[in-house]
Amino acid sequence: MSPASLRARHYRTVWISDVHLGFSGCQADFLLDFLHHVTCDRLYLVGDIIDFWQMRRGLYWPQSHNNVVRTLLGKAKHGTEVIYVPGNHDELLREHDGLQMGNVAIQGRVVHQTADGRRLLVMHGDEFDSVVQCSRLLALAGSQAYALLLRANRLVNFVRSRCGLPYWSLAGHLKHRVKNAVNFISNFESAVALAARRHDVDGVVCGHIHRAEISTIGEVLYLNCGDWVESCTALVEHDDGKIELLHWSDQQHALKAETALPALAA
């Protein structure tokens, strides 16, 4: 898909997850750029949109995070159906399951039907994370270690941006390299696929593990939104039901390169 075709592109459905507003690692500017270039009939916020875990340690809420909230509410105001499926970092909102606020609904999980008739279970996915379920203390400790890794990630990308290079996820790279992380992801995906079969759906849309993917596990379609901390990814559904994974950091870099070409030519 060319960068030009992404400008003001309309989709039937968009899924984003793991934004982590309130956390210094949140890539709010990338997300705002995405939201300004995309419209949709239905927008799913698939958990961990607001990071209450990090906010307990200290308030971090820059203007860009305010702008994300305002943009999301603006989309709802102008006709986009917004469905918020809370995750473990914004689990406080699970107490309000079923609440409808204008064009924004809070739902613990929901079944989405694509244009071509497939039924997809939309849920955050922390239900399949044994660390979150069995030990909240261990999960919080892991969250702190992850925050340190993301500080290193910001330093790496500061240097890359000065060199004119696109965004690159250090944390994502390590996930692919470290055996335990790979095993965890594989176990997580298998558990999600099993849940899909139990709920008699064609597939599952989730987030939580910060690893975007579209794959088939057995006969189950596995769709992970990724995140807006490391990979800056979203899932989109076209009018014919086709689902695509967008890596927005790559697209944004391409857009900048394209807009620079006329200036160079002049």
Image (cartoon, grey):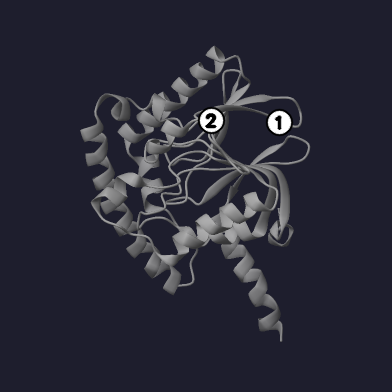
Residue shown at the point (57%, 46%) measured from the top left: 234
* Crowding at mark 2 (Cα within 10 Å: few <14, some 14-19, many 20+): few
Residue shown at the point (77%, 40%) measured from the top left: 239
- 34 sits left or right of 126 in the view: right
* Marks 1 and 2 in Cβ contact (< 8 Å): no
- 250 sits left or right of 19 in the view: right
Instruction: Please report whichever mark, 1 or 2, sits nearer to the chain's N-terminal start.
Output: 2
Q: Secondary structure at mark 1?
A: loop
Residue 95 position in % (x across, y down): 42, 32
* Crowding at mark 1 (Cα within 10 Å: few <14, some 14-19, many 20+): some
Which residue matches tag 2? 98
Residue type (three-letter) at the residue carrying disc 1: Thr
Q: Residue furthest right?
A: 240
Kindly identify which numbered label has been placed on residue 44: none
Residue type (three-letter) at the residue carrying disc 2: Gly
Residue 200 position in % (x across, y down): 60, 14
Residue shown at the point (21%, 34%) measured from the top left: 137
Q: Is residue 167 visible?
A: no
Above/below status of 73 relative to 47? below
Q: Is residue 3 visible?
A: yes
Q: Secondary structure at mark 2?
A: loop
Above/below status of 103 relative to 157? above
Rounded to the nearest angstrom, the CA distance separating label 1 from label 2 is 22 Å
Kindly identify which numbered label has been placed on residue 114: 1
Q: Residue furthest bottom?
A: 266
Above/below status of 103 relative to 78? above
Quarter of the image that includes the C terminus: bottom right
* Of the pair 171 and 144, the residue shown nearer to us: 144
Residue 103 position in % (x across, y down): 63, 43
Residue 133 position in % (x across, y down): 31, 25
- Which callout, 1 or 2, points to the residue nearer the camera? 2
